Image (cartoon, rainbow, N blue to C red):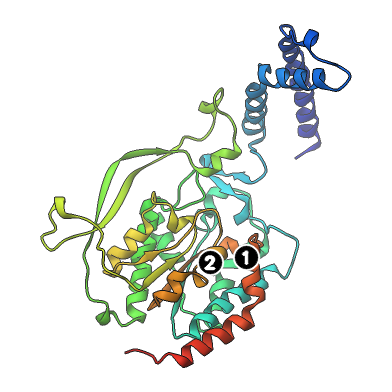
Amino acid sequence: MTGTSKKLTAGLFILTVLTLGGLSLRSLANYGGAEKLDPINGELARDLESHYDDKFPVRDLGTNVWAAINYVVFDEGRPGVTIGRENWLFTDEELFPATDNPKLIDTNLERVGEVSRFLRAQNIPLVVLVVPSKARVYAEKLGDIRPAPEMQALYLRFLERLESAGIAAPNLLDELEQAQERGTQVFLRTDTHWSPAGAEVFARHASGYIRHTRDEQSWGEQTFVTTLGEPLTHEGDLLNYLPLDPLFGDLGPRPDRFNERETVKARDDESANNLLFSDQQTDLVLVGTSYSANPLWDFPGALRRYLGKDLINVAEEGQGPFEPMTEYLQSEEFRSNRPSLVIWEFPERYLAQPIASEQALAWFGNTSHQLAAATNRNQSTPEEH
């Protein structure tokens, strides 16, 4: 921000504060509780503060006005969002590391390896589906904005580390970019997440990789059918960083629109009235983030359809990739129903994010004991073929 723009920002801020402050004093005109309250013990002050907060007439106006000034004049939102070309919004988590800790990415890469070793000790294969960032696939929408060097290198660094550790992980960036070049919107304009169409592209190529590397003959073939619902207007999560509603909503980016999707298992006759998920047990498990957990994207459904096999989805929203995985590995579901394959959906940006869950950190802090226990269980339980 230049010196001139800083002065203009300061001037607009002062003018806004003075104007709103003057208007807010009107809310004190009808206050009538002073006669019944004791000013000595603080009752009067607390009641007056509560009245002022409840009757403040321009609270939303102040928020909306300042958001509109930042957005229209400076092309900025609240910290956490970057505004690109043509009203494309990007989370700052894809552009900048969350901390100054230079070892964080390596630490998280090692944690991925620990999960793999834990599963490998029990002869359970793992496939990691690394989701490229929206800022990577739609780099042209960033304009002159450039991610930090470590974020630019993150995707290939992740895949190279997985390959060196012998962890199966397909490179699906090209498929998403090619679909985008052909006109498919693979990520949402106002949301961090992929579109349902992008989730399907990713699922199709991920399933091809999994079927190629695994013995698909042992899976059999199940048929799943995807139906399109009515067009949906979706206000993406990144619009929360542009508080323009209700006064200036028309100034901001338009919400995304897409058709809802639902994937269900088809019975033999595949009639429309006989579409439902099978109650049969499955030993294929999907672990991941909101990219898998949110039903709007129908990513698990697309995986089922292209794999020709049902799966258990234990993904969670708002937890990142590590907490759902460590929760699953400690769950009764994992102990009682041994999976034949674990698929881990993992957005690349989370390598540069610290783990917030104390439970997940404790699991990684106790990895040596976890591996020993897993090895002992595997040695005491003969492998079934």
Mark 2–mark 1 Cα distance, whole angstroms, equals 8 Å
Mark 2 element type? helix
Taking depth in this image into account, of 264 and 141 the one nearest to the observer is: 264
From the viewer's perspective, is 334 left or right of 34? left
- Whether residue 110 is visible here, answered yes or no, is yes
- The residue under the point 81% across, 30% down is 7
Quarter of the figure with the C terminus: bottom left
- Residue located beneath label 2 in the image: 327
From the viewer's perspective, is 322 left or right of 169? right
Mark 1 element type? helix
Instruction: Evaluate if marks 2 and 1 touch, with contact meaning CB atoms under 8 Å apart.
Output: yes
Residue 349 image offset from top left, x and y in percent: 58, 61
Residue 1 image offset from top left, x and y in percent: 75, 40
- Residue located beneath label 1 in the image: 359
Residue 325, which numbered label? none
Mark 2 / mark 1, whichever is N-terminal: 2
Taking depth in this image into account, of 278 and 40 the one nearest to the observer is: 40
Relative to 311, say whether 85 is above or below.
above
How many residues crowd mark 2 within 10 Å: few (<14), some (14–19), many (20+)? Answer: some
- Whether residue 184 is visible here, answered yes or no, is no
- The residue under the point 64% across, 31% down is 67
Taking depth in this image into account, of 156 and 44 the one nearest to the observer is: 44
What amino acid does circle 1 point to? Gln
- The residue under the point 56% across, 48% down is 90
